[in-house]
Amino acid sequence: MIDVTGTPELFDDARARSNVLRLAVAQALAGANSAVIFATGAIVGSTLAPDASYATVPISMYVVGLACGTLPVGAISRAYGRRVAFIIGSGCGALCGALAAVAILRGSFALFCCATFFGGLYGAVSQSYRFAAADGASVTYRPKAVSWVMAGGVFAGVLGPQLVQWTMDVWPPYLFAFSFTAQALVALIAMALLSTVDAPKPAAADLHGGRPLAVIARQPRFIAAAICGVVSYSMMNLVMTSAPLAMKLCGLPLSDSNFGLQWHIVAMYGPSFFTGSLIARFGAPRIVAAGLALEALAATIGMSGITTMHFWSGLVILGIGWNFGFIGASALVLETHRPQERNKVQAFNDFLVFGLMAVGSFSSGQLLANFGWSTVNAVVFPPILLGLIVLTLAGFAKRRSLQQAGSIPEPL
């Protein structure tokens, strides 16, 4: 826990609640961007790529864009305010849709990959919505603010697939061309909404104050938050990405795969309606630990059988585990910085999470193809164990610092 006595912050939960509503809607609209890409990227890639083995490259380019965008988002937010970063990000989303539609019409694989990269940049900006919701909020309201913004993902899971379903055949024979045009329009709507978010430019004192990033990153609390965020997101992405192909290889119908992924997305974001309250009541470390344990349980289910119910139940539990682990880790990050340090610290945290996820996204398919579904699930356990260990060590370090400060008595 950091000492904020030297950096007083004025709390305005009424303003924070107003921002939370706008950011939750923006999260739903931004989620449609990634949903359209994940639903159509491999299909479009297989028709445009010079070789079928490159079919999933557009999706990997989205993840690369996600990783590349995190640090610039922090720099822009720190220099010009979050609202400017939000508007630039939604502009990238509109550009993604426009370029993707042109790429499909012209049959350009390279242009389509470029489009999904811009979609990843939009995704990087949307990841900062959860932290923006906590700006200026009281300590007790911050976890709830993060949680409620993430809840917008539930509606993204509905909006994105429906957007594809309604628009995929509008411009025959160019499948999905109009879907990306519609996605660009949705991004422009998000831009208009985000322009009303109350996120003023940082004060001049905030641009130069605060500790060096290296000092902040050495805190046991930050190390635990970053590692747990990386583990919870990367392991979820590893299993989720492999599951549809694994179900196909097991002879299960495509409809079963689509149904399982739909409920996985609902499970990822649905608990957000109460995750913040759980964090406020039990503390972020316990919720993170519960999330990691649930991801381990999902992997155990995946290794125990290959029936439809094994896949469905595993994907749902995996989604809930990600929700607890990632939102809990985000709440831990909020405990490690002072107000004037937030942009650089939050951006660095997301860079670690999504940078390592980008590396994993290129390996999931090869892991499944060469070693099988059981191995994909077995890979989950060592990182989960690492996350639990560092979380425990961070708890010991916090208790020791409180004892040295005389806040709690030494144990007998």
Image (spheres, grey):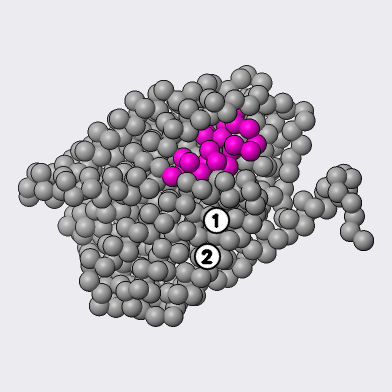
Whether residue 242 sits left or right of residue 219 in the image: it is: left
Q: CA distance from mark 2 to mark 1?
A: 9 Å
Q: Which mark is residue 325?
A: 1
Give the extent of the magenta segment.
Answer: 132-151
Whether residue 46 sits left or right of residue 333 in the image: it is: left
Instruction: Give the residue type that dot 1 points to.
Output: Gly
In primary-sequence order, the first of circles 2 and 1 is 2
Q: Is residue 139 magenta?
A: yes
The quadrant holding residue 85 is top left
Q: How many badges with numbers are in the image?
A: 2
Q: Find disc 2 in the rendering and name its residue.
A: 294
The quadrant holding residue 105 is top left
Above or below, comparing residue 78 to residue 131 in the picture = above
- In the picture, the quarter occupied by the N terminus is top right
Q: Is residue 352 magenta?
A: no
Rendering coords of residue 398 (x, y %): 77, 51
Dot 1: within a 10 Å radius of its alpha carbon, few (fewer than 14), some, or many (20 or more) residues? many
